[in-house]
Image (cartoon, rainbow, N blue to C red):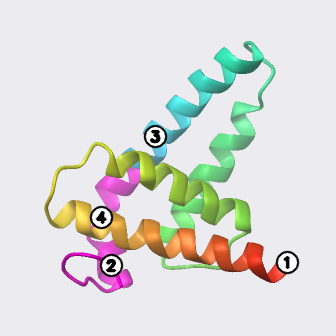
Amino acid sequence: MLPGPTVPLRVAIQDSTAELDAAAMEFMSTTQREMDAMLGPGVFDHGMLARDVVGAFGLIKSLNFDMRLVDFDNVQAALSMKLDTLGAGPARDRILVIQTFCARVADYSISLKQ
């Protein structure tokens, strides 16, 4: 059970498009900086990450959950970062619902493979 008010997943997604867009952009920007610092500029394929992240967030926003494990993992990672910047309130509650859903799907998928 999630702490705080219960928000249906569909409502959380539909009411959070601005936060979802911001989370995707922040995640791609942060990941690019971190990967370049770790591996050196030009080594990591940022174009592929951008396509994956934009595609995954597009599917989530259209309530299409026919996604790969990496898509759920990217969305939940981006939303985890976003949660760190959101104060208490309805926006945070909605993002937490979406992030928790994606993290659980990723966890279940991994456990089924084991």
Locate residue 89, reporting x and y percent: 13, 62
Question: Marks 3 and 2: CB-CB under 8 Å?
Answer: no
Q: Residue at x 25, y 68 (%)?
A: 93
Quarter containing the C terminus? bottom right
Span highlighted in magenta in the image: 1-21
Locate residue 49, reporting x and y percent: 68, 42
Q: Is residue 28 magenta?
A: no
The residues tagged by marks 4 and 1 sit, at their Cα atoms, a distance apart of 32 Å
Q: Which is nearer the N-term, disc 1 or disc 3?
A: 3
Looking at this view, name the residue that lies furthest to the right. Answer: 114
What residue is shown with label 2? 2
Quarter containing the N terminus? bottom left
Question: Marks 4 and 1: CB-CB under 8 Å?
Answer: no
What residue is shown with label 4? 16
Label 4 vs label 1, nearer the camera: 1
Q: Nearer the viewer, residue 69 or 3?
A: 3
* Residue 113 circle label: 1
Q: Quadrant of residue 47?
A: top right
